[in-house]
Image: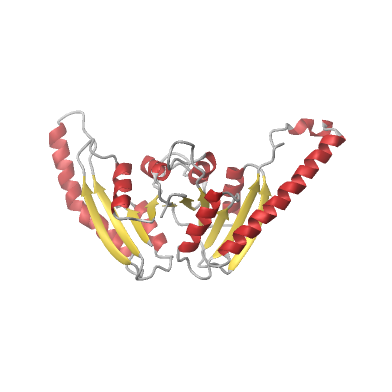
């Protein structure tokens, strides 16, 4: 597997590098540590400020890469570095990362979630958000490590039985996570009656109650089939697998299950938006924003 680790030298990027050390990479795998030197234009004395800032950034770039490489030292994968320099307006940060991923023939983009200071930690920085939305490759967004006792890596795989979820599951199986990793497969049943005001629930007729009960029975039977299918597929890779079925809003239930299960990473397929390659659907976007842990967004067009 070929991974592009985008770093800007921040603690968030270093945290992303540390997360990658928890995966059993082999000498056949490769990690390219990428850093882009770019500058935003200044309203006054543009040339002076730009030249000065570029000079400082060029001087710091090797140290930024060295920091990530030092963290990755324990891994068995081949490590390389890549620095690209861009003038203002030539390439936005997110475009730089996406171009580098294509140039390096990467299978996966990994990056830290910077977040926004002063706002709830669920929010992501703009570069992370845009890269994840527009990438045609799977993207692993690594959030700050939780303080927890040592133990197996805990993975929550959200599956709705779609081709997007299957593709995400296949990609999950291709990542050399530790043998003792624990996988929970979650299927959320989106109820067609979820928007019914609770205060009117007692007024539902017996006939409608029977209809609802029948539909729910079918939904849970379909959920069980979806979970068993995913379990059979992931069982070729993982030994410790459990299944979980919930009813409600998919985004809410996925985030809730990740929090209650103290998960390390959520894996979710990207349904996408029709006519806009790579763009995320609402569930994957909401999960990425509100997840209490790292998130792997699968893309059907990834290699």
How is the rendered protein coloured?
Answer: secondary structure
Question: What residue is shown at x 70% (from left), y 37% (from top)?
Answer: 192
Task: Point out residue 257 in the picture as x, y percentages from the top left corner.
Answer: 60, 52
Judge whether 67 appears above or below 121 on screen: below
Q: How many marks?
A: 0
Question: What residue is shown at x 38% (from left), y 44% (from top)?
Answer: 131
Q: Name the one closer to the observer, 172 or 62.
A: 172
From where the camera sits, is residue 41 visible? yes
In what quadrant of the picture does the N terminus appear?
A: bottom left
* 254 on left or right of 68: right
In what quadrant of the picture does the C terminus appear?
A: bottom left
Question: What residue is shown at x 38% (from left), y 56% (from top)?
Answer: 107
Picture quarter containing residue 20? bottom left
Judge whether 146 appears above or below 217 on screen: below
* 257 on left or right of 27: right
Question: What residue is shown at x 76% (from left), y 43% (from top)?
Answer: 215
Task: Point out residue 45 in the picture as x, y percentages from the top left corner.
Answer: 14, 31
From where the camera sits, is residue 147 visible? no
Q: Name the one closer to the observer, 186 or 13.
A: 186
Picture quarter containing residue 95? top left
Task: Point out residue 71 in the picture as x, y percentages from the top left corner.
Answer: 33, 63
Q: Residue furthest right?
A: 206
Task: Point out residue 169 in the picture as x, y percentages from the top left corner.
Answer: 53, 57
């Amino acid at each position: 597997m070929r991974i592009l680790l985008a770093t800007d030298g921040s603690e968030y990027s270093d945290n992303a590098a540390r997360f990658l050390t928890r995966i059993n990479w082999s000498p056949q795998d490769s990690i390219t540590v990428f850093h882009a030197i770019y500058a935003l234009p200044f309203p006054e004395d543009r040339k002076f400020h730009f030249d000065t800032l570029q000079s400082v950034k060029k001087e710091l770039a090797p140290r930024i890469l060295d920091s990530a490489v030092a963290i990755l030292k324990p891994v068995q994968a081949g490590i390389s570095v890549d620095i690209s320099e861009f003038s203002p307006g030539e390439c936005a940060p997110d475009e730089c990362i996406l171009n580098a991923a294509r140039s390096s023939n990467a299978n996966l983009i990994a990056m830290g979630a910077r977040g926004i200071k002063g706002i709830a930690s669920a929010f992501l920085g703009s570069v992370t958000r845009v890269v994840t939305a527009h990438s045609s490759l799977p993207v692993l967004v690594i959030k700050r490590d939780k303080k927890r006792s040592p133990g197996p890596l805990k993975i929550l795989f959200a599956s709705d039985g779609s081709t997007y979820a299957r593709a995400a599951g296949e990609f999950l199986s291709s990542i050399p996570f530790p043998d003792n990793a624990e996988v929970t497969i979650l299927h959320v049943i989106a109820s067609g009656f979820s928007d019914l005001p609770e205060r009117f629930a007692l007024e539902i007729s017996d006939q409608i109650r029977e209809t609802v009960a029948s539909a729910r029975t079918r939904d849970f039977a379909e959920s069980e089939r979806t979970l068993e299918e995913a379990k059979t597929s992931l069982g070729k890779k993982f030994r410790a697998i459990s299944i979980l079925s919930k009813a409600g809003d998919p985004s809410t239930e996925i985030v809730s299950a990740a929090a209650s299960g103290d998960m390390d990473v959520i894996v979710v397929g990207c349904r996408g938006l029709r006519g806009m390659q790579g763009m995320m659907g609402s569930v994957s976007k909401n999960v990425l924003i509100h997840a209490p842990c790292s998130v792997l967004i699968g893309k059907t067009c990834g290699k």
